[in-house]
Image (cartoon, grey):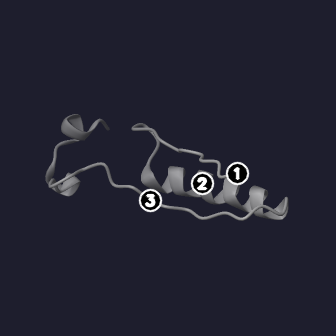
Amino acid sequence: MTRFIFVTGGVVSSLGKGITTAAIAAILEKRGLKVAMQKLDPYLNVDPGTMSPFEHGE
């Protein structure tokens, strides 16, 4: 059976979410589970680099 784990959050930096996700994946792989990670950028048709921090929640 396929299971999904979603790591989300606006306060934690992308680096923090990536490290957290990688750590969870490493733990699951050590337990013998197959892990595939997928990153999703929720900004559709918007460049978050040009937005003010208040617009994208930081």
- The one nearer the camera, 16 or 31, is 31
Q: Secondary structure at mark 2?
A: helix
Q: Is residue 44 left or right of residue 27?
A: left
Specify few, some or many for label 2: CA neighbours under 10 Å numbering under 14, 14-19, or 20 or more.
Answer: some
In which image quadrant can residue 26 be found?
bottom right
Which quadrant holds the C terminus? top left
The spot of residue 46 in percent (x, y) is 15, 53
Of marks 3 and 1, the one in the foreground: 1
- Which residue matches tag 1? 1
**Mark 2 and mark 3 in contact (Cβ < 8 Å)?**
no
- Which residue matches tag 3? 39
Q: Is residue 15 left or right of residue 55?
A: right
- Which residue matches tag 2? 21
The spot of residue 37 in percent (x, y) is 55, 62
Q: Amino acid at mark 2?
A: Thr
Residue 14 lies, with reference to residue 57, above or below; the image says: below
The spot of residue 50 in percent (x, y) is 14, 54
